[in-house]
Image (spheres, grey):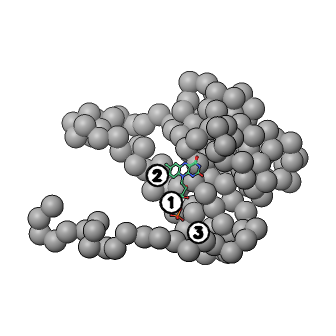
Amino acid sequence: MQRTAVALHRGDGPSLLVEVGKATSSLGMNKFVKDASALVLITQESTNITSKLGCGIKDKDFPVMDLGIASAYITLAAEDEGIGSCILGWFDEKKIKELTGIPQKKRLMLIISLGYAAKPKRNKVRKEWNKVVSFEKY
Ligand SMILES: Cc1cc2nc3c(=O)[nH]c(=O)nc-3n(C[C@H](O)[C@H](O)[C@H](O)COP(=O)(O)O)c2cc1C
């Protein structure tokens, strides 16, 4: 089966979300995740032959890029609804697959935590645009 995303929310029974949340948390990372209202688990599915060929010829991992793009759009759509989010790459993949029934042979690439922010957003410190963009030449 090809699903790409598995959604968990507190309505499904809080324990699964909390268990998955706990499995994202180690070495002081991601303590907040077990308190999220919802989690979206992003899995990598097998690609079609065209995509495989394109990746091979261009030596680029297009499916991983697609998952990053999809994840970014989920966070933007959430923000538009006034919902906070965090893209997570730090978690116990094997444990979460066991908990949610994602086959072990599939990769669980990212998790997006969603919820209403407990406190106002911190001030974002961004690099100046001219430190990250150049014109005409690299
Ligand atoms: C692929 C990826 C994986 C990430 N993994 C984590 C993570 O496991 N835990 C975490 O707190 N932040 C993680 N982050 C960072 C946050 O998702 C977020 O990008 C960061 O807090 C900066 O947010 P801002 O751009 O709104 O300031 C990850 C970001 C990316 C792009």
* Residue at 26% across, 33% down: 56
* Residue at 55% across, 44% down: 89
Give the amino acid type for the residue marked by disc 2 in the picture. Answer: Gly
Mark 2 Cβ inside 8 Å of ligand 1: yes
Residue that badge 2 annotates: 68
Residue extending furthest toward the left = 137
Q: Who is closer to the viewer here, 14 or 88?
A: 88
Marks 2 and 3 sit apart, C-alpha to C-alpha, by 14 Å
Give the amino acid type for the residue marked by disc 3 in the picture. Answer: Ala
Mark 1 crowdedness (10 Å alpha carbons): few <14, some 14-19, many ≥20: some
Q: Are marks 1 and 3 in contact (CB under 8 Å)?
A: no
Residue that badge 3 annotates: 77
Q: Who is closer to the viewer here, 66 or 34?
A: 34
49 in relation to 85, above or below: above
Q: x%, y% of residue 73?
A: 52, 63
N-term-proximal mark, 2 vs 3: 2
Mark 3 Cβ inside 8 Å of ligand 1: no
Give the amino acid type for the residue marked by disc 1 in the picture. Answer: Ala
Q: Is residue 80 left or right of residue 67?
A: right
Marks 1 and 3 sit apart, C-alpha to C-alpha, by 9 Å
Marks 2 and 1 sit apart, C-alpha to C-alpha, by 6 Å
- Please, what secondary structure does the residue beneath circle 2 have? helix
Residue that badge 1 annotates: 72
Q: Quadrant of the C terminus?
A: bottom left
